[in-house]
Image: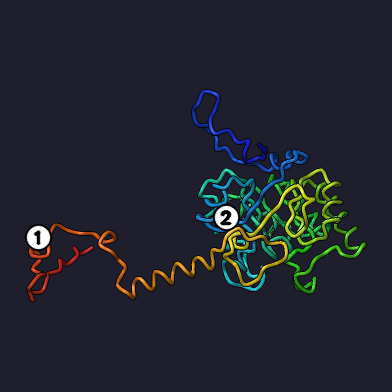
Amino acid sequence: MTESPASRLPDQTADGSKPFAPCRVTAPDISASKGSGTPLVMVTAYDAPSARIVDGAGVDMILVGDTLAMVVLGYDDTLQVTTQDMAHHVGAVARTKPNALVVGDLPWLSYHVSIDDTVRNAAALVRAGAGAVKLEGGRKRLPAVRAILDAEIPVMGHLGLTPQSVHALGGFRVQGKELEDARAIVDDAIALAEAGCFALVLECVPDAVARLVTDTVPVPTVGIGAGRHCDGQVLVFHDLLGLEDRMRPKFVRRYAQWATDGTDAVRCFADDVREGRFPSSNETYHAADTFPDELRLTGSTAEVEVEEPAPA
Ligand code: KIV
């Protein structure tokens, strides 16, 4: 039986009653899990149903990622979402009161302009219900990381392929393939961990680089396209469930085919409607048998009087 931060949450207090305080995974729980031997599990969610699904599966962290822009809102990159958008979706996830730690992704430009803006934007995600925020970038972002931590908000770092830099990087490409770039990722990771980040996402880096970072930093690494030598793994909800099936990066494993299953299901519904099979009698509300007569609907051409609503 493996022990993850989520599985360690008490269901009950010692006397058998429900605990008074909400039992949630916290950022300190996540950082303390380094070296536990049980990989961390993080999955994205963007609304209440997806949050219930992933929390019901017992994940440790729910990331309300800025992938929202691509998998939910239909944009081609993540640059299109604002702090307000992110807070809207963090709120939907947090209202389900998940056990997992809710991590709110700071979108592009929310931590690039000024330190005041940065702290206010991080606070907006916390007020919406996040227990931590994530931002992309290494040493360049240390002032932002420090300011958010100073406001008592836990920060998760994100290195390797940082999609908010898609134009500067020249596309969505694996990072750290050259020695110099790999060294920069390791140095960035050390700097973020020393600054106080409680965990680091490593996206699309060779497994040797992820392994070196994981062995070097004292906080958990959570990989996506970074191989197995990380302290945990994250996937995007829509990729994992096959809801997003237009592209499939190498690192995605699909555990369901919701897009095709959904289209098949809706096609069946359309056929049933068109063929008169829906709704059935069981799917219909019925009044007493005499009711249609009383309404003079049967065998009558008289119009049924409709009561006017009372004036407001
Ligand atoms: O926004 C997101 O979903 C992410 C993950 C891909 C790690 O940052």
Of pointers 1 and 2, the one earlier in the residue sequence: 2
Quadrant where the image shows the N terminus: top right
Q: Which residue is mark 2?
A: 90
Residue plotted at (77% across, 52% down): 228
Instruction: Locate residue 219, reporting x and y percent.
Output: 78, 44
Residue plotted at (70% across, 40% down): 28
Left or right placement of residue 294 versus residue 127 in this view: left
Quadrant where the image shows the C terminus: bottom left
Question: Where on the image, by quarter, is ligand 1?
Answer: bottom right
Q: Are marks 1 and 2 in contact (CB under 8 Å)?
A: no
As drawn, 159 above or below 101: below
Residue plotted at (75% across, 60% down): 225
Q: Which residue is mark 1?
A: 290
Give the Cα separation between the discs numbered 1 and 2. Answer: 52 Å
What color scheme is it?
Answer: rainbow
Q: Sort mark 2 into few (<14), some (14-19) or many (20+) by Cα contacts within 10 Å.
A: many
Q: Sort mark 1 into few (<14), some (14-19) or many (20+) by Cα contacts within 10 Å.
A: few
Could you say which is closer to the camera, residue 221 or residue 229?
A: 229
